[in-house]
Amino acid sequence: MRLDVVTIFPEYLEPLNVSLVGKARARGQLDVHVHDLRSWTYDRHNTVDDTPYGGGPGMVMKTGPWGDALDTVLADGYEAGSRAPALIVPTPSGRPFTQELAVHLSERPWLVFTPARYEGIDRRVIDEYATRMDVYEVSIGDYVLAGGEAAVLVVTEAVARLLPGVLGNAESHQDDSFAPGAMAHLLEGPVYTKPPHWRGREIPDVLVSGHHGKIARWRRDEALKRTTAHRPDLIEGADPEGFDKKDREMLSILGWEPDPAGEPYGRFWRKAPDVEE
Ligand code: ADE
């Protein structure tokens, strides 16, 4: 897979040399090109932004440098034999970046990222390239970063670990918390490793019982507890068909009940906890 990143802070992308992404690069599984947007400015101050039409706070990134940068990057990539680029525009007003989108992007041969600073990029740039390639405007969460570079690192890492041969264990990402097609989307529970005693803390007995069925059940119960605590929306949104008898027992202990009027039938819901408690 080829990745191009155009940014005014190329050094911000240094982490792409480290760890999993760095190794994938070294092995030739990822071909990463980071470009300085200011290489496509022609004035003394290397200007990339200007005041917004219509007024308002902040600055907007100009069409000129982005247009010239993207034309060059796309021409270089095509020249090198890459095909079907997708433009990834990190923005807090984008669609949520999810595991499903990560899987989808991991199947594309070439991603071009345009992390912006200031109030974003002049809309015409995105509209222009949308006529020639698929554009994904993505947000990595409901908070505002100072720029899109950190979002590029997030998306790159989530995508790179899905590429064939990048993760050591081929099965590793099949049971990711948000893997598409997982029964119900549940958060993973706690994990433990040696030593068995640490500062007076033990590990759950079931994990050394050698009883695979009981271990799987325990893990599932822990996942239900954790999801109830941190992401009750995932239980509310889950297809109730995905919960077996034992799941239902645990859900009941956790205060959930099937809603006979739910859509689909029997979706789980929970009374809001009493304020006194
Ligand atoms: N740029 C600023 N905030 C962002 C966010 N939440 N996601 C993606 N890009 C951003």
Image (cartoon, grey):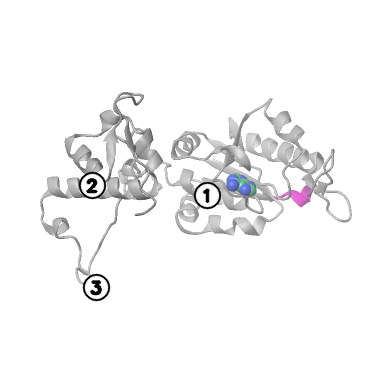
Q: Which residues are magenta?
A: 36-40
Say what amino acid the circle numbered 3 marks.
Trp
Q: Residue at x 47, y 46 (%)?
A: 158
Gap between marks 2 and 1, in whole Å? 30 Å
Task: Give the SS element for disc 3.
Answer: loop
The mark that comes first in sequence, 3 or 2, is 3
Residue linked to disc 1: 154
Q: Residues within 10 Å of mark 1 (few under 14, many from 20)?
A: few
Task: Give the SS element for disc 1.
Answer: helix
Gap between marks 3 and 2, in whole Å? 24 Å
Q: Which mark is residue 117?
A: none
The mark that comes first in sequence, 1 or 3, is 1
Question: Does the magenta stretch mainly form a helix, a strand or a loop?
Answer: helix
Q: Position of residue 71 (x, y in %)?
A: 73, 36
Q: Residues within 10 Å of mark 3 (few under 14, many from 20)?
A: few
Gap between marks 1 and 3, in whole Å? 33 Å
In the image, 274 versus 59, the foreground residue is 274
Q: Residue at x 84, y 46 (%)?
A: 51
As drawn, which residue projects farthest toward the right?
A: 44
The mark that comes first in sequence, 2 or 1, is 1
Say what amino acid the circle numbered 2 marks.
Asp
Which marked residue is nearer to the observer: mark 2 or mark 1?
2
Residue linked to disc 3: 198
Q: Is residue 192 left or right of residue 24?
A: left
Q: Residue at x 51, y 46 (%)?
A: 30
Q: Position of residue 19 (x, y in %)?
A: 46, 58
Task: Judge whether residue 192 is colored magenta.
Answer: no
